[in-house]
Amino acid sequence: MTYQEPDVSFPPPEFVRRGPPTSVRDMDRQDKEKWGRVVVVHPRTEETADGVRHDFVKKGPFTLPLAVRREGVDLGSKEAWAFFTHPYTVFPEDATFYNVEGKGCLGARLFVRGQEGVRLYDEVGANLGGSETVVDTFQGALGVLRHRVLGEGNLGDPLAADLLATDIDLLQVFHLFTYLLRTSAPLKTLRELYGLFSKPTLHNFAWELFSERERDLMRALQAGGENEGHEELKRSPIRFRVDRDDFTRITDVQDAQGTQAILGLLSEWEAFQEAHRDRMAELAVGIQEQEAVLAAIKQEVRTLQKEPERRGLTALFARNKVKAINELKAKAVVAIRAKRALEAAFDEIPGYERMKGLSDRVKGFEATVESVYGLARDMGDHNVDRADVSALRTLVLDRVLGEDEDEAKKALRAYDLRLRAELLPKVLRTHDLSAYLLRRPDALRGKVSRRNIARVNTLARFLIEYFRSVRYGSKSTFGEEFDATWGQVIGLEGQI
């Protein structure tokens, strides 16, 4: 659906060259003009041996006037501002937009494609027919374009095949990002990633998530193969995995003076043992004796239970057997009570309860940190895997892009269902796990593992923005599902 306001007005070139009001001399213009600064995302056509291919690239940024205030119209009126139309000779008709910061510029919120050009608006809720969202990232702007084509099921659109290929490539990149977290031999994975990043769309989407050193390694790997990659790693060691050494150990916990807290605890425990050595040894021997009695009783009970019944004396033997087992159980009760009394005597030793509590807390801390490390190490088990990507690619190539139009529509619905039911929940789950890990500085202290997990988390956020408009639940989109969960947490963190 297109929209065209009756008074199409293009901004004069000299007005555009003058730029937004940013200085003291321009104060009289500040309440009369609205300016924006946006980057354009649009398809770039390329002829290949296999036909026409579209790469989705960015252009800009452009600082442009959004509107000027109409003379003599009240500022609260809907007609207070005259919005400019920007011709398609400047911005392609199939483009989308995202905001970047600019001095004296507002953030645009909507854009409308008319017959002669595009208009950008700084307000939402204007009920403009056919309007689309101006977002704040390249990934989100590409998602707006995706929704325009695939959200309406427009398989006849020239961009449909390349957008479907982009879906699959991005999910493959996501899989490889988490695979890097657990592999000790990353070179093959890095070469595969570099091949994907050679595509301009993916390069714009996620290439910046790697540092310059990491990019140099991938370039060297591509140019010289495995040997050059190994040499580059030797010259400048780079780690991509999650390492146990980056997670807190009990020896890392320090007091206010920077001394290992565990040393003080050990010293206190040694002093306690020295003061109560004889009593503790006596109680320990008593507990061991009772445990030995219990072990012997258990063995006798097992022997009786396994002993076969004797013919002709079945009833008598059964009664004797039950009686013997009951007598052993009575002895076990006595031993258990004796053991508990000895354990209670431990608690009566002055200071033992405190030492026991500290020991339990140390063990609990170690178990908690180990569970956090396990989440990081096994994150790939919860993410999109290679089989998911392969199945999706086969579905697209064999059915969605097939020649049978009716079959293609059915296959597109199957593709959409698989995204919603299988793939996108994994994207959310991986985002949730990585976000939780990054919010555990008490457990995750090493910079390298933190950086690698942050890279996965950022790519998950990018994918959420890209797939934001995909229908997810019966009444919600994928983006709305995220906003209702972790999106709220992130929003609150931004306000603190």
Image (cartoon, rainbow, N blue to C red):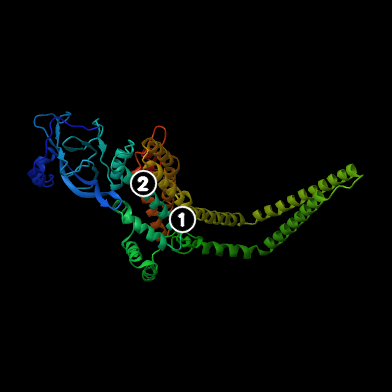
Q: How many callouts does the rendering have?
A: 2
* Pick the front one: 292 or 211: 211
Query: Dividing the picture into quarters, in which one does residue 13 lie?
Result: top left
Residue in the picture at 45% in, 59% down: 242
Could you tell me the amino acid type at mark 2? Asp
Q: Secondary structure at mark 2?
A: helix
Image location of residue 365, percent across then percent down: 52, 55
Residue in the picture at 72% in, 57% down: 287
Q: Which residue is mark 1?
A: 443
Image location of residue 168, percent across then percent down: 38, 48
Where is the N terminus found, in terms of image quarters?
Answer: top left
Q: Which residue is mark 2?
A: 167
* Pick the front one: 269 or 40: 40
Image location of residue 123, percent across then percent down: 23, 35
Q: Secondary structure at mark 1?
A: loop
Asked if residue 120 lies left or right of residue 335, the reply is: left
Query: Dividing the picture into quarters, in which one does residue 150 lie?
Result: top left
Could you tell me the amino acid type at mark 1? Ala
Label 1 with label 2: CB-CB less than 8 Å: no
Asked if residue 8 lies left or right of residue 461, the reply is: left
Q: Is residue 484 visible?
A: no
Q: Is residue 86 visible?
A: yes
Instruction: Give the vertical position of 153 relative to 60 (above or below).
Output: above
